[in-house]
Image (tube, rainbow, N blue to C red):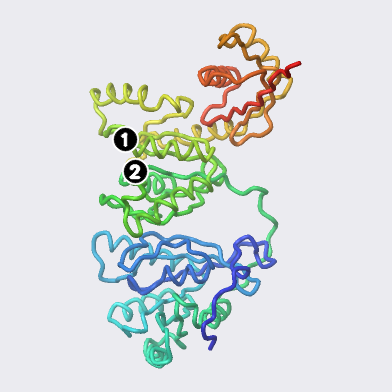
Amino acid sequence: MTEGYDLPEHDTDPTTDGGASGPVPVLAVVGRPNVGKSTLVNRIIGRREAVVEDIPGVTRDRVSYDANWNGRAFTVVDTGGWDPDAQGLALSISAQAEVAVSLADAVLFVVDATVGITDSDEAVVKILRKSGKPVVLAANKVDDQRTEAEAYGLWNLGLGEPYPVSALHGRGSGDMLDAVLAALPEPPPQPEAEVGGPRRIAIVGKPNVGKSSLLNKLAGENRVVVDNAAGTTVDPVDELIELGGKTWRFIDTAGIRKRVKSASGHEYYASLRTTTAIDRAEVAVLVVDGGESISEQDIRIIQTVRDAGRALVIAFNKWDLVDEERRYYLEREIERELVQVQWAPRINITARTGWHIDRLLPALEKALAGWETRVGTGALNTFLGRLVAEHPHPVRSGKQPKILFGTQPTTAPPTFVLFTSGKLDASYERFIERRLREEFGFAGTPMVILLGVREKRKR
């Protein structure tokens, strides 16, 4: 037994693949609600990524994480609490756990050693036996010798040796992970994947606007728990989906609430993870309920996307419920509230039925193309020379700043550096941005304009 064992950071680096170039094996972590599955997942992957709180039902979807132990890479799938007698939302969560087991190569079954064997545990064992997958039994919450002795009573589940662990403190986790590696198959060698990997799309928006419904419709199956209750999604959920002959990585996120400070407990951490998801993505799809007014939350999310320098597509969902009067007022709201992101492609969809979902792919491709557009230095300065000749900067306090030279050092997002003889007015910078977009495109992407002011030296 490895007492007080804490997983070292380097053993859980998801960027290493243990020398394997093929697909890594999958470990599903299942168990009743609130037995410490997400805490154990954080212990395995070596970082606090899965949302954890001392109330059942915080994890609701199956969420994948990269892990590495003793030089071997594998994928850990965290699931919601599995209750065979569940109803309503809990039934959907249990169904996701069952799907995770069917897709996994091995299962880590987590039991609360301080509670012992329950009827639900025995019911789950029957389902696990039926699946035919190798199972490692983790007796969690073993923080001392006395509880460790009680943990061995879990032999009665008939799943073999229980591994006493403390997800909170790391006790026994090394022995458990050795057993996990023994249960997982070796990954077959395969040719290297495409450089760069799939394009990354974050689906963001307020709670209950239909983000998970959109992801399920794109995937063609129920991969994410959907319920009318706001806040069903808590962890960001990554899904690889085939669209237009290409693979895309979609990240479904928890709804961002009005203010992060007003969110309590797991909602607060879920909001932080949503911001992280935007940082990880290349394009953000903001889902807005077409039947509701564009809100302060929507504007705040747009600002977060712009600050992160990510491309943006705006999808007005539930369009089947939008009547003529609402459409009129929505157009006025768009003109007033979204003036700062007129460049973002907008689509109207109904995620529930799939109406106009096919319009998302062209919008994504357009936004990515704009995000990665580069203008040659020659073409840029020809454009700037013509622009300044036609519309010179206004004279301020007897001075008239001039643009001497321009260059675009980077893309994603497009960033321009203008060398000038003086500081430009903010309104003139906005004018330059507008004309750059008219001339070269840049649809779907924010743009950064930096100034290098070269003041004339006094004699």
Disc marking residue 37: none
Reply above or below: 330 against 7.
Answer: above
- Judging depth in this view, the residue of 13 and 324 nearest the camera is 13
Q: Which amino acid does label 1 sit on?
A: Ser
Q: Is mark 1 on a helix, strand or loop?
A: loop
Q: Crowding at label 2, few (<14), some or many (≥20) Cα neighbours within 10 Å?
A: many
The quadrant in which residue 390 appears is top right
Please identify, in this view, whether the residue under mark 2 or under mark 1 is nearer the observer. Answer: 1
Q: Image point 42% across, 34% down: which residue?
A: 314
Which residue is identified by label 2? Answer: 206
Image location of residue 224, percent across then percent down: 38, 54
Residue nearer the viewer, 263 or 21: 263
Q: Is residue 231 above or below residue 299?
A: below
Corner quadrant of residue 100: bottom left
Residue at (56% x, 11% y) in the render: 397
Rendered view: 173 above or below 13 = below
- Would you identify the image quadrant in which residue 291 lies? top left
Going by the image, does 235 lie left or right of 370? Answer: left
Horizontal arrangement in the rendering, residue 232 relative to residue 172 (left or right): left
- Tell which circle, 2 or 1, labels the residue nearer the N-terminal end: 2
**Count of labels in the image:** 2
Name the side, left or right, on which 7 lies relative to 286: right
Residue contact at pointers 2 and 1, CB within 8 angstroms: yes
Residue reaching furthest to the front = 459
| Residue drawn 37% across the image and 84% down it | 113
Q: List x then y, in percent, for residue 79.
A: 40, 65
**Residue position for label 1:** 295
Cα distance in 3D space between marks 2 and 1: 9 Å
399 and 326: which one is in front? 399
